[in-house]
Amino acid sequence: MRTRFFLLLFVFPAFVLDAQVDFNSYFLDKTMRVDYHHVGGKSEERLTLDKVYQEGPWPGSIVNLVDTLNLGEYMLRVFDLKTGILLYSRGFNNVFHEWQTTAEAGRGVWKTFHESVRFPFPRREVQMTINRRDRAQVFREVFSTVINPADPTVVITGAQHPGFEIVTLMDNGHRHRNVDILILGDGYARDESDKFKADAKHFNDVMFETSPFRERRKDFNVRAMCVISPESGVNIPDRNIWKNNTLGSTYNTFGSPRYILTEENRILRNIAATAPYDFLCILVNDDRYGGGGIYQLYTTTYVNEKNAGQEWQRDYVYVHEFGHSFAGLADEYYSASTGYDEFYPEGIEPSEPNITRLMNPPDVKWRHLVTPGTDIPTDWGKEEYDGLRGKLMQLDRLADDYYEKRDPIMQRGKDILSNPELLGKVGAFEGAGYVSEGMYRPSLDCRMFSLGLVDFCPVCRAAIERQIDFYAE
């Protein structure tokens, strides 16, 4: 295998970057997985090749091979080595990018993350590149390597079936014409397989009771894999709880108690390789509120709600986090604490479809969906809403009259977010993406803004449907 470092954008003509190619001319109906190590600190990164795998049948579209969605911080591109034709591309995010914005990275620490990209198995040599957005949001190459699919020293047969049971929850047709979701359990002991199956069915039902997934149900196949862990539960570092859970899911990611990720990428990918999938959802067998979702990587969700009557919270998390991993949606809230330091730098327009810096008002990027007559930016009562949040923080949670004082404040906040003159309209509402000022969201309220079972706003819904269309064609 030869590794080359040069900018393919200067080698191949621009027209090859957009055209879709004939699948059967360049690919076999199998999956190639390329694993690599992502190493770096706050302002530097290096990628080094690990291994190349041959996995099972290709699960994705054979029509839409070249990415037209323009989502993600990174972009995988696969070129035919002989002709320079762009065969395949996909935008994606990763844990490394998020970690770069943490205080730990800011202190000069370097870390290594194991990552994977997947694409149809090529018939002949290809040039694979990984590209990252610069400050102008243009993708620039950060890694390049030549892969020969016929070379037995570099292409390794994928992991064998580990014996975990696979249950089909929805089957709506061929994998090439549907979105394939694989739900995996983490922290489920051997005697909890029935619990996992019930949990998987529950969350899948929740997903497809939510618009626009409900209306597009026939465009999805969903399978659940009963991954068995030696111990029940997952890691909770701030409680000094450490479990032998197979997928390595862990709370306290980047110091945030509720953020659940796993850094055991190779294990996750080897296990998942035994079933066709486009998107992965991990159900975490614990009762602490939490989850996570990274575009084109995976979703995590806690499944056990310990507070009676609050079961809706886990349902909210599952769908909200899937919005991140499936459609590349950003968090629209701005009040909750995170482990990030300036995740969205000033002066740079985010790539996510549902937040904007609004640097050229009234020209907002979702202008085709703006409700006629709506001011840009849109006044929504933010000053009063933020004042209510301040009052809540000043209350003594241990005082006898805490709930008596809290409830009217919370009710007024709900009233602001249900203003009938603004509800359902699309404009530019200040406060989004962990930023209180200078960042805007499309609507007054949305599943990506409020902790509640509200609908996706029109902009988020359009982004979800665009992703479905891309995979289901």
Image (tube, rainbow, N blue to C red):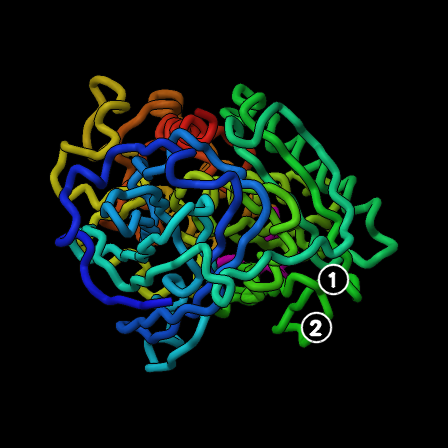
Drawn side of residue 378 relative to residue 330, left or right? left
Expressed as whole percent of the image width and height from the top left, the position of residue 21 reads 32, 33
Q: Nearer the viewer, residue 330 or 338?
A: 330
Q: Are marks 2 and 1 in contact (CB under 8 Å)?
A: yes
Reading the chain from its start, which is encountered first: label 2 or label 1? 1
Query: Is residue 277 visible to us here?
Result: yes
In the image, residue 270 sits, relative to residue 222, either above or below, namely: below
Most extreme residue toward the bottom is: 108
Secondary structure at badge 2 equals loop
Rate crowding at label 1 as few (under 14), some (14 to 19) or many (20 or more) other CA atoms within 10 Å.
many
Q: CA distance from mark 2 to mark 1?
A: 9 Å
Q: Magenta residues, as a range?
A: 394-403
Residue annotated with mark 1 = 233
Q: Main secondary structure of the magenta part?
A: loop
Q: What percent of the width, then of the height, locates residue 165?
A: 78, 46
Quarter of the figure with the C terminus: top left
Residue 241: numbered disc:
2
The x and y percentages for residue 402 are 60, 53
Quadrant of the rendered image containing residue 457:
top left
Residue at 34 percent of width and 81 percent of height: 107
Residue at image x 42%, y 39%?
327
